[in-house]
Image: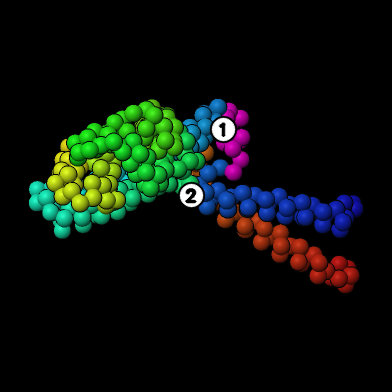
Amino acid sequence: MATVSLGDLAHSFMLRRQTVALKAQSQRLSTEMVTGLAADRGAKLGGDFATLGSIDASLARLESFKIAGNEAAGFSGALQSVLTLMDDLAGKTAPLLLTAGTAGTAPLIDPAGMTALQQFEAVMVALNTGFAGRSLLAGAETGKAAVVEAETILTAIETASSGAATAAELATAVNDWFDDPAGYAATAYLGGAALAPLSVGPTDEVTLAVTANDPAIRDTLKGLALAALLGRGVFPGDSYQRGEVARLAGESLVQSQSNRTGLAAEVGLAEARIEAAAARNAAETTALKIARTQLLGVDSYETATLLETTETQLETIYALTERISRLTLVDYI
């Protein structure tokens, strides 16, 4: 009885097809070994992607909150640095002015006035600080500078107070200019309304509503601007009035200290909320990733065993293919 066998071409095709299938299986199992997740999600989930979709959507949303939180943390940190600098400069200037005002002598008043002028200019520059291309203290108008230059403000104040004959009248004129809606707010502040609350978590919002038009900042600028006028030569030759200007400016800076502290505390609370939200988001992200792994995870031992079996089968086919390719007519007969 004749033996029926596959022809050489059919045999070769069958081996090639088995090789391709085993290679694909080996690649899939290798990937699963590395990731610990099933490569064929449909088969693993039985075609039900609802739970996985919900988890992935939540992870994507938490990632957006993470980005927003990181930006908010950087923004609030930079804002706190500006407020700290302003408070530091005002705190160092106040004693100099009070001492000069008490002494009432030009050798103390003149240097204190020049120092105050420099500090006022430094504060105005700091108020225009930006973070990641956004103005910190311009409110919603983040693409603008927050305030004009110190020179512009001092010139406007000198014009508004040109009729002042005493230090008290000058101090009143300076205060009025900063408080008048047509003064500082209209001509010196270039920003807009405060920033809207920012979402940094599923249930967390933070408000960074500080602008260069905040009352605490305006109050500080009043004292520094008044003292800066000494550096620009107000009441020339009148040591008494100049001493009074120094005293009133120093007292103004001391009185505005509590407002500066309150403003810094407000930003500090926002920083704490951002940090707490980030911690909650991180914990939820970890829990979701664990749940995702449980859905798609594979048994590492079983996968390793299957991979080893597949590689053994591949080696067997390679050996068989090599042997067939070496057969000669003499071997066949």
x%, y% of residue 201? 40, 32
Identify whether 140 is placed above or below 312: above
x%, y% of residue 30? 58, 53
Q: Residues within 10 Å of mark 1 (few under 14, many from 20)?
A: some
Residue type at the position of mark 2:
Tyr
Q: Is residue 148 left or right of residue 253?
A: right
Residue hosting label 2:
301
Residue hosting label 1:
45
Write down the region rendered in magenta: 39-49
Residue type at the position of mark 1:
Leu
Q: Is residue 72 magenta?
A: no
Q: Quadrant of residue 217?
A: top left
Kind of element beneath mark 2: helix
Kind of element beneath mark 1: helix
Residue beneath the point at 52% across and 52% down: 34
Residue beneath the point at 9% across and 51% down: 103
- Circles 1 and 2: CB atoms closer than 8 Å: no
Q: Quadrant of residue 256?
A: top left
Q: Is residue 142 visible?
A: yes
Residue beneath the point at 53% across and 44% down: 37
Q: Is residue 197 left or right of residue 112?
A: right
Closer to us: 228 or 62: 228
Instruction: Say which quadrant the C terminus sits in.
Output: bottom right
Q: Residues within 10 Å of mark 2 (few under 14, many from 20)?
A: few
Q: Is residue 257 visible?
A: no
Which residue occupies the extreme bottom position in the image? 330
